[in-house]
């Protein structure tokens, strides 16, 4: 199975400051069709996960443009340009390239300092 | 509005069975892969199973193979998860999620399954 490693696991951030979460995979996530199936999800307290970013860098409809995704191969990053109070929660990267099984990062808990 | 809503969770004894349901609305259900994903405090998020558009292909995580069965009824816009021989480690919130080439969206609110005597 592909191992997904997120860092940091805990991320205290001051309101208005940027935040960055790293996600690394144990093997390349480039699929034979040329796509990279690496997605980012946000889980706010008491809520179900919500997709933010799909295929590395595509923002979902309704997701604020302060969220951005980047990376390639085995190294990916989710960035929040200016953290707001509503961004508190746990962020997960999930790979779908080698999807039997799909695998997840451990989650990064973002909190306001 | 595109949404999926799970039901059927509850408390069950080890070795027992439970059937989860997921009602889909707001999109053409028959054109999407569908997934079950679970979340437990000890193991975080774990993909459980998925099924293709016409139900002819099903895939499972190793830990549930032979015990869980995913199915769908496109006429009823519904997804199911039949869970047999339940174990304590199956305790989790179970989410239904619509599949696409870009992952899973949306997810339902989840239904809690507790396996305990």
Image: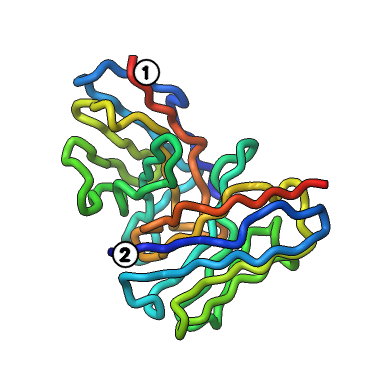
Query: In the rendered structure, the residue with mark 2 lies on which chain?
Result: B
Image x and y of residue B91, in percent: 68, 47
The answer to whether the residue labelled 2 contacts the one labelled 1, judged by CB atoms less than 8 Å apart, is: no
In the depicted structure, whether residue B105 falls above or below residue B34 = above
Marker count (numbered): 2
Foreground residue among A77 and A90: A90
Residue A112 placement: quadrant: top left
For the residue carrying disc 2, how many other residues have a C-alpha within 10 Å: few (<14), some (14-19), or many (20+)?
few
Foreground residue among A13 and B76: B76
Name the residue rendered at 19%, 21% in the picture: A16
Quadrant of the rendering where the C terminus of chain A is positioned = top left
Image x and y of residue B90, in percent: 70, 51
Name the residue rendered at 37%, 58% in the picture: B106
Left or right: A10 in relation to B67:
left
* Disc ID at residue A55: none
Image x and y of residue B95, in percent: 51, 55
Name the residue rendered at 62%, 57% in the picture: B9
- Which residue lies most toward the left here? A65
Q: List the residue tagged with mark 1.
A: A12
Q: List the residue tagged with mark 2.
A: B2
Distance in Å between CA atoms under marks 2 and 1: 33 Å
What colour scheme was applied to this rendering of the protein?
rainbow
Foreground residue among A64 and A25: A64
Name the residue rendered at 41%, 69% in the picture: B24
Left or right: B48 in relation to A70:
right
Query: In the rendered structure, the residue with mark 1 lies on which chain?
Result: A
Image x and y of residue B1, in percent: 28, 64
Q: Secondary structure at mark 2?
A: loop
Q: Secondary structure at mark 1?
A: strand
In the depicted structure, whether residue A87 falls above or below residue B93 = above
For the residue carrying disc 1, how many other residues have a C-alpha within 10 Å: few (<14), some (14-19), or many (20+)?
few
In the depicted structure, whether residue A32 falls above or below residue A49 = below
């Amino acid at each position: 199975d592909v191992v997904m490693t997120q860092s940091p696991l805990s991320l205290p951030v001051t309101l208005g400051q940027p935040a960055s979460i790293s996600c690394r995979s144990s093997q390349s996530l480039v699929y034979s069709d040329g796509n990279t199936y690496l997605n980012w999800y946000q889980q706010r307290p008491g809520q179900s996960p919500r997709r933010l970013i799909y295929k590395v860098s595509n923002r979902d409809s309704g997701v604020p443009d302060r969220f951005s995704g980047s990376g390639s191969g085995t190294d990916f990053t989710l960035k929040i340009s200016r953290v707001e109070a509503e961004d508190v929660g746990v962020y997960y990267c999930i790979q779908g390239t080698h999807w039997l099984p799909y695998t997840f990062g451990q989650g990064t808990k973002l909190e306001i300092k | 509005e595109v949404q999926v809503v799970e039901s059927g969770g509850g408390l069950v004894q080890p070795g027992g069975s439970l059937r989860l349901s997921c009602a889909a609305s707001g999109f053409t259900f028959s054109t999407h892969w569908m997934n079950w994903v679970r979340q437990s405090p000890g193991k975080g998020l774990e993909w459980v199973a998925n099924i293709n558009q016409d139900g002819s292909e099903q895939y499972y995580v190793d830990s549930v193979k032979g015990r869980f069965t995913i199915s769908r009824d496109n006429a009823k816009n519904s997804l199911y998860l039949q869970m047999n021989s339940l174990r304590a480690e199956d305790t989790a919130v179970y989410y239904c999620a619509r599949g696409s080439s870009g992952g899973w969206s949306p997810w339902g609110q989840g239904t809690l399954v507790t396996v305990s005597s």
